[in-house]
Image (cartoon, rainbow, N blue to C red):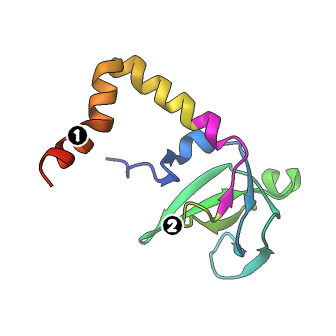
Amino acid sequence: MPAPQPYYNKVPLGKLLDQAIYANTRMIGLDKNFSKQLYTFNKGDYIGGLYSWVNRGNKTYMMFYRTSEDFRKFNPFYVELPSSSTALQIPEIDSIKAEIEKEQIEQKGIVRTYLDKYLFLLYSSINP
């Protein structure tokens, strides 16, 4: 059975494939063996378009290619998936979240979606 898909800022990484990703804090790019630091990304630096991800131990690493030559030679670099929801800048993340919510509404129906989302608030206000 495959491992569950990792999330960043409540968005599954599969929805972020090919999206432009920028550092919002200092990030490190590692080689394909995860042993050598290749790049340092500072706030505002373009990391790349997300190509894939790899689970290694208890960490998830996002996979990027710097150049088309790196892609042809299967020479990716990896950046650890941050736990902080503000560590990355992803310009399209709000529209992706809206698309996910629309898909959920279509699958569950609008009433069920909003009950799932807000029922606990109603319950916790009645039973503090």
- Extreme-left residue of the structure: 127
Magenta range: 88-96
Distance from Cα at disc 1 to Cα at disc 2? 29 Å
**Image quadrant in which the C terminus is located:** bottom left
The amino acid beneath tag 1 is: Leu
* Residue 83 image label: 2
User: Percent from the top left, x then y, of residue 105?
Assistant: 40, 22
User: Percent from the top left, x then y, of residue 100?
Assistant: 50, 32
User: Percent from the top left, x then y, of residue 81?
Assistant: 57, 64
User: Percent from the top left, x then y, of residue 6?
Assistant: 46, 53
Answer left or right for 53 relative to 18: left
Comparing labels 1 and 2, the label whose residue is closer to the camera: 1
* Of the image marks 1 and 2, the number of the one nearer the N terminus: 2
Front residue of this view, candidates 63 and 81: 81
Q: Residues within 10 Å of mark 1 (few under 14, many from 20)?
A: few
Q: Is residue 95 above or below residue 50?
A: above
* Residue 122 image label: 1
Answer left or right for 21 relative to 125: right
- Extreme-bottom residue of the structure: 36
Front residue of this view, candidates 68 and 61: 61
Residue 94 belongs to the span the image colors magenta: yes
Front residue of this view, candidates 65 and 95: 95
Q: Is residue 119 above or below residue 87?
A: above
The amino acid beneath tag 2 is: Ser
